[in-house]
Image (cartoon, rainbow, N blue to C red):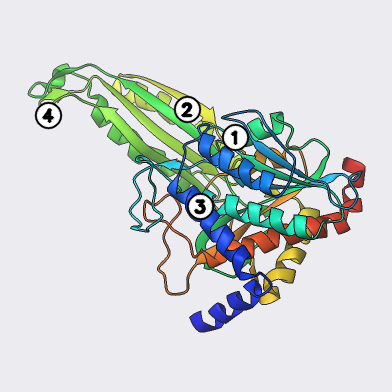
């Protein structure tokens, strides 16, 4: 299987010349070596701008923390634009890939592959300049996808002005290089975060009857909250409740008076989300009564679900087939329970979010956000070709969006 896929990837990349492939690889490695956290993408933005200037692509940039937006006119600049998006920010963490292009910035790394997304979009820009598309293409390099919904900043910066539809993508080890996942409807989950504050009564570890143990109450809650998914949510609608962080206690012989639990909720349907939110509050109230404690919860709304729009899906699927062939266009059976701020674009315009396989056939899968995450760089050419092609396909069918622009 690996040999066959390698041959397929070679065929897909065969239309790209060696200098082009070398350039996008070097770009990706530069971005990977110089990761910057959300809203601090200063060097990253400057490097993108230098590439746009080399290509003589006009751009707009409001400074650090804002989007870099490039403008490719195309053959008919009066048409509505098709937008293509890449994210610029890295994650906090210490890289363990051992690659010679590993992060030079302690405490930050491109563990989510955004370095690849930027290189792919710059590669697509090269292709669009060499062979102008039918109409305008908007190149959107956004800040802060990982922390704070940078797509909303990009929208405020004008990323969607005059845009008929937007397309984006993400690398993944879920599929091998040379495959493109295109899915209709839900692609990622709704994300919410919550904090539970437990206040009991502190005391000596030898005299528990005089205290109200916040840690014991926390343990009860951690177990009880799992039933919100296992017993109160439709099993056909994927949902997750996770407690990822606990802060409590000061010493082994002291009963903790206070505890804080930090968690997340991922849901694929709004009815499940509402049910879990209600259940959390109900269980918090019951636990407080049961243990004679004061317990408060704060629920914070995260990213909405990414829901691909059918016409855009059709265009993305057509572009994917044109690039990798029908046998290598896949559809995930279920949406990812991860979240993506591409959803905010889709709240404003039609669009489609796809995934690029980026795992070499000889590799074991490594999850996104792992300090060991890396990509098969052959995926860069696949992504650049797809982004170029989907912009052209969308322009060929832009009349399908004309009444909405």
- Taking depth in this image into account, of 266 and 8 the one nearest to the observer is 8
**Dot 3: what SS?**
loop
Task: Residue 304 in the image: state x and y as whole percent.
Answer: 62, 39
Label 3 Cα crowd, 10 Å radius (few <14 / some 14-19 / many 20+)? many
The residue indicated by pointer 2 is: 281
- Please say if 355 is above or below 18: above
Discs 1/2, front? 1
**Dot 1: what SS?**
helix
Which image quadrant for residue 64?
top right
The residue positioned 85% from the left and 55% from the top of the image is 395
The residue indicated by pointer 1 is: 150
**Dot 2: what SS?**
helix
Discs 4/2, front? 4
Task: Residue 172 in the image: state x and y as whole percent.
Answer: 52, 59
191 vs 264, left or right, is right
The residue indicated by pointer 4 is: 252
> Mark 4 or mark 1, which is nearer the start of the sequence?
1
**Dot 4: what SS?**
loop
Q: Is residue 21 visible?
A: yes
Q: CA distance from mark 3 to mark 4?
A: 42 Å
Q: CA distance from mark 4 to mark 2?
A: 30 Å
- Please say if 258 is above or below 117: above
Q: CA distance from mark 1 to mark 2?
A: 30 Å
The residue indicated by pointer 3 is: 113
Label 2 Cα crowd, 10 Å radius (few <14 / some 14-19 / many 20+)? some
Q: CA distance from mark 3 to mark 2?
A: 37 Å
> Mark 3 or mark 1, which is nearer the start of the sequence?
3
- Taking depth in this image into account, of 371 and 385 the one nearest to the observer is 385
Label 4 Cα crowd, 10 Å radius (few <14 / some 14-19 / many 20+)? few
Report the number of numbered marks: 4
């Amino acid at each position: 299987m690996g040999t066959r896929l390698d041959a397929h990837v070679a065929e897909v990349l065969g239309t790209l010349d060696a200098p082009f492939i070398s350039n996008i690889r070097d770009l990706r490695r530069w971005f990977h070596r110089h990761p910057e956290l959300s809203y601090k993408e200063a060097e990253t933005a400057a490097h993108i701008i230098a590439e746009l200037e080399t290509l003589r692509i006009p751009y707009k940039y409001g400074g650090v923390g804002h989007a870099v937006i490039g403008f490719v006119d195309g053959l008919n600049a009066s048409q509505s634009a098709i937008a293509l998006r890449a994210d610029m920010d890295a994650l906090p963490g210490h890289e363990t890939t051992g690659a010679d292009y590993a992060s030079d910035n302690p405490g930050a790394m491109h563990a989510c592959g955004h370095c690849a997304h930027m290189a792919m979009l710059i590669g697509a820009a090269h292709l669009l300049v060499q062979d102008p598309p039918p109409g305008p293409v908007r190149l959107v390099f956004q800040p802060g996808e990982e922390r704070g919904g940078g797509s909303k900043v990009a929208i405020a910066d004008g990323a969607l002005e005059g845009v008929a539809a937007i397309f984006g993508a993400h690398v993944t080890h879920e599929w091998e290089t040379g495959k493109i996942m295109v899915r209709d409807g839900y692609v990622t989950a709704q994300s919410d975060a919550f904090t539970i504050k437990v206040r009991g009564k502190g005391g000596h570890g030898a005299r528990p009857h005089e205290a109200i143990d916040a840690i014991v109450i926390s343990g009860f809650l951690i177990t009880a909250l799992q039933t919100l998914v296992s017993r109160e949510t439709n099993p056909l609608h994927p949902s997750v409740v996770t407690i990822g962080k606990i802060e409590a206690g000061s010493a082994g012989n002291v009963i903790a008076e206070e505890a804080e639990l930090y968690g997340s909720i991922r849901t694929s349907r709004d009815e499940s989300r509402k049910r879990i939110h209600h259940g959390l509050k109900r269980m918090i109230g019951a636990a407080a009564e049961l243990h004679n404690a004061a317990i408060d919860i704060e629920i914070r709304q995260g990213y909405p679900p990414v829901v691909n729009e059918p016409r855009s899906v059709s265009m993305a699927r057509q572009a994917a087939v044109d690039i990798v062939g029908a046998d290598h266009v896949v559809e995930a059976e279920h949406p990812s329970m991860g979240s993506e701020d591409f959803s905010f674009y889709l709240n404003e315009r039609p669009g489609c979010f796809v995934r690029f396989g980026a795992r070499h056939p000889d590799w074991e899968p490594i999850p996104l956000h792992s300090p060991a995450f890396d990509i098969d760089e052959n995926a860069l050419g696949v992504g650049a070709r797809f982004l170029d092609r989907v912009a052209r396909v969308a322009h060929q069918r832009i009349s399908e969006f004309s009444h909405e622009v």
